[in-house]
Amino acid sequence: MTTGQSKKEAWKWVPSLYFAEGLPYIVVMSVSVIMYKRLGVSNTDIALYTSWLYLPWVIKPFWSPVVDILKTKRAWIIAMQLLLGAGFAGAALTIPTTNFFRYSLAFLWLVAFSSATHDIAIDGFYMLGLSKHNQAWFVGVRNTAYRFAMIFGQGLLIIFAGFLETSNFKESGNVPFAWMISFFVLAGLFILFFLYHNFVLPKPEKDRTKKELTFTFFSKEFLKTFTLFFKKKQIIIILLFILFYRLGEGQLAKIAAPFLLDVKEAGGLGLTTSQVGLAYGTIGIIALILGGLLGGFVSAKNGLKYWIWWMLVAINLPDLVYVFLSFTQTSNLILINTAIAIEQFGYGFGFTAFILFLIYISEGNYKTVHYAIGTGLMALGMMIPGMISGWLQEMIGYNQFFIWVSISTIPIFIITIFLKIDPEFGKKMEIG
C-alpha cells in the first residue's frame, strides 16, 4: 500500500496506534509509582528506581538510527507490541512474589525500552504511511488518542485497581492481587494491539530495510549531526534551559502521588487509590490537556518569545498548591481536586513553550535528529532530579520538600534572561 492511503483506511490504525504509543509511557512513569506506593515501597526507592526507567528515552537519539536502518518500521511496531504484552504479563506474575520490587522492575525495564523503541517506529511509520496532506489532517487525531491513553492509564486503570483493592471478591483487600490483575489487563490489551495492527497496518513502499547503509557510513553521519548540535550558538544556555526547565516538575512528578496516598500521620492526604486515579489521573489529566490546547492556541498567535515568560510562570508557580495541601492536609476532595487541576493546567500551558523551544533549536538540515537529541536531554532533565526526590522528601518531610520544589524553579527564570529567541518564531504554527 502506498503513502496515498485514504482517510477512511487511516482511521483504522492511526488512533489505535497512538493510544498504544502513549499507554506504556504513562504506566512506566506514573502508574508504577502509585503501584509501588500501594505495595509498601519507600519513597526513596520509588523515586530512584522508577526515575532510572527514563533512561531508554534519554538514549533514544542514539538508538533511533538503528531502528531506521534495521528492519521496517512496521516490523518494529508489531514486534514491540508483542514485547510490551510480554513485559506487562511478566510484571503481573512477579507482583505477588516476595521479591516483587526487583523482579517487576526488571520487566518494567523491558517495557520502558520496548516503549521507547515503539515510539521511534510509530513516529517514523506515520510519515511513511500517510500523504503529506493526511499527516497534517491526522495531527489532532493522533494527539487526542495519545491523551486518551493518559486518561486510561493514569485514571481509569488506577481507579480499576483501587476498586479491586476494596472489592468483595475472594481476594478482597489484597493489594498485590489488584495490581496483578491490572497488569494482566495491560498485557491482554497489547496482545490485542499486536494482533490487530499486524492485520490492519499498511505496507508503505518506502518502509524498507536500508541495507545499503553501512555501519561506517551511519557512524560518520550520526557523529556529524551530533557534533553540529553542540556547535549551535548559545549552546551552554540551550543545554541549561533544557535541563532546568522541568527541574521542579521532575521532583514533583515522583512525589505527588505518594503524598496523596500517604496517611496523614506521615504527612500525606490519605486518599484511596481510586481517589488518586480520579484526582490526578482523570481531572488532572483533563486540566493538563486543556492547558496544552490553550498554550498551543496563544503561542500560534503571538509566538514563543512573547509567551515564554508567562508559560514559565504557569509551569512553576502552581507548584505552590502542594505547599498549601501539605500544610493544611485537607480532607476536602473538591479542594484537593481543584488544587491538582490548577497545577496540571499550568503545567500543560507552560510545557508548550518547552516543546516550541525544542522545535526552535532543531531548525536546519538535521531537524529530526536534533529534535531527538533535545528530547533525550529533556528526559535526562526529568531523570536526574527524580532520582533524588524520594530521598530528599524522606529526609525533610512533605512540607519542606514542596517548599524546596518551589525554590528550585528559580534558576530557570535566571537562565531564560540570557536566551535569544526570534520574535517571529511560533506564530501561525500548529501545536497539537
Image (cartoon, helix red, strand yellow):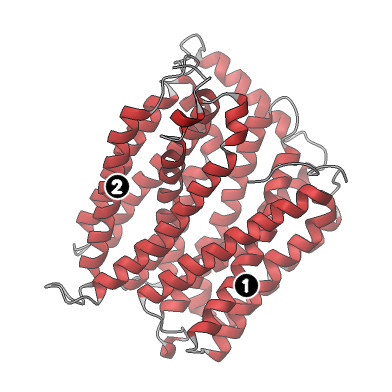
So how many labels did they put on this image? 2
- Between 235 and 334, the one lying in front of the other is 334
Measure how far apart labels 1 and 2 are at the Cα level. Answer: 32 Å
Q: Which mark is residue 67?
A: none
- Between 337 and 208, the one lying in front of the other is 337
Where does residue 65 sit, x and y in percent of width and height? 53, 26
Q: Which residue is painted at 17% across and 76% down in the image?
A: 172
Where does residue 146 sit, x and y in percent of width and height? 49, 48
Is residue 374 placed above or below 23 in the rendered structure?
A: above
Is residue 175 placed above or below 199 in the rendered structure?
A: below
- Between 134 and 410, the one lying in front of the other is 134
Is residue 256 placed above or below 383 in the rendered structure?
A: below
Q: Give the mark nearest the N terminus, 1 or 2.
A: 2
Q: Residue furthest left?
A: 170
Quadrant of image for the N terminus: top left
Where does residue 63 sit, x and y in percent of width and height? 49, 32
Q: Residue furthest front?
A: 8
- Left or right relative to 353: residue 337: left
List the residue tagged with mark 1. Answer: 342
Q: Is residue 384 visible?
A: yes
Where does residue 361 sit, x and y in percent of width and height? 75, 39
Q: Which residue is painted at 57% across and 78% down in the image?
A: 338
Q: Amino acid at mark 2?
A: Leu
Q: Secondary structure at mark 2?
A: helix
Q: Amino acid at mark 1?
A: Ile
List the residue tagged with mark 2. Answer: 189
Q: Is residue 246 visible?
A: no
The picture quadrant where one finds residue 266 is: bottom left
Q: Secondary structure at mark 1?
A: helix
* Mark 1 vs 2: CB contact within 8 A: no
Q: Which residue is painted at 56% across and 68% down in the image?
A: 252
